[in-house]
Structure formats: C-alpha cells, structure tokens
Image (cartoon, rainbow, N blue to C red):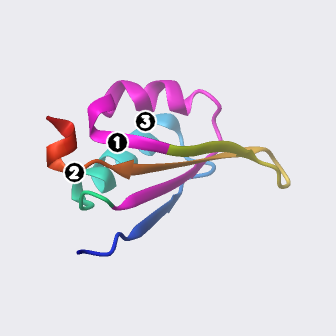
Amino acid sequence: MKQSTRHKLDLRGAIIPFTLLKVSQVFRTIQPGDTLEVYWSDPDTPADLFKILPESSYDMISMDVVEEEEPSYRMEIQKKSAEKVL
C-alpha cells in the first residue's frame, strides 16, 4: 500500500486569485490519499476555495487560526481516491 505524502503551501500575504490558482494547481497534481496543508492570510479565502474544489474530491482534516505576528489561517485537506469520488 502506498504511503501518503504531505504537501505544504505557504501563501500568507498572497492575493486571493493567486492563492486559489496555486491551491488548485497543486491539488490536481497530488495523488489520492495525499494531504495538502495550506497557510493563507485573507479570511475570505476558504469560501472562494470551496467554490473551485469539488466537495467530492477531498476530505477536510482541519482548519484553524494560526496566531503569529498577524493572524493567518491553516487548512489541511486529503485528496479522495477515485473510488470515493464516485
């Protein structure tokens, strides 16, 4: 059985269109079972992100606020296998 891989994108400070583009590009290239961890700054990003990623293509693992100098956000999703998407 294949070991899942964790991918990470730190997009804090990036504008929403760029964030959405990068997340969708990386998500398309990862293998089913792999996880994608994304950091971003704009609190509106999840609403837009969930519009472009089909709900049937991923499982939400976690989403939370990261308190550092300025608040940012973190989300981890796992790409579903082809069998689960059907």
The amino acid type, in three-letter code, at marker 2 is Ser
Q: Is residue 40 magenta?
A: yes
Describe residue 35's horizontal placement relative to residue 13 as left or right: left
| Residue highlighted by disc 2 | 81
* Quarter placement of the C terminus: top left
Q: Which residue is mark 1?
A: 58
Q: Are marks 2 and 1 in contact (CB under 8 Å)?
A: no
Q: Is residue 41 visible?
A: yes
- Let me know if residue 41 is in the magenta part: yes
| Residue that numbered label 3 is attached to | 17
The residue at the point 41 percent across, 59 percent down is 35
Going from the N terminus, do you reach mark 2 or mark 3 first?
A: 3
Instruction: Give the answer, above or below, for where 8 lies relative to 67.
Output: below
Q: Which residues are magenta?
A: 34-60
Q: Looking at the picture, which amino acid does disc 1 mark?
A: Tyr
CA gap between label 1 and label 3 equals 20 Å
Q: Is residue 54 visible?
A: no
Disc nearer the start of the sequence (2/1): 1
Q: Residue at x 85, y 54 (%)?
A: 69
Q: Position of residue 17 (x, y in %)?
A: 43, 36
Residue 43 percent across, percent down from the top left:
65, 31
Residue 9 in the image: above or below residue 41? below
Q: Residue at x 32, y 45 (%)?
A: 24
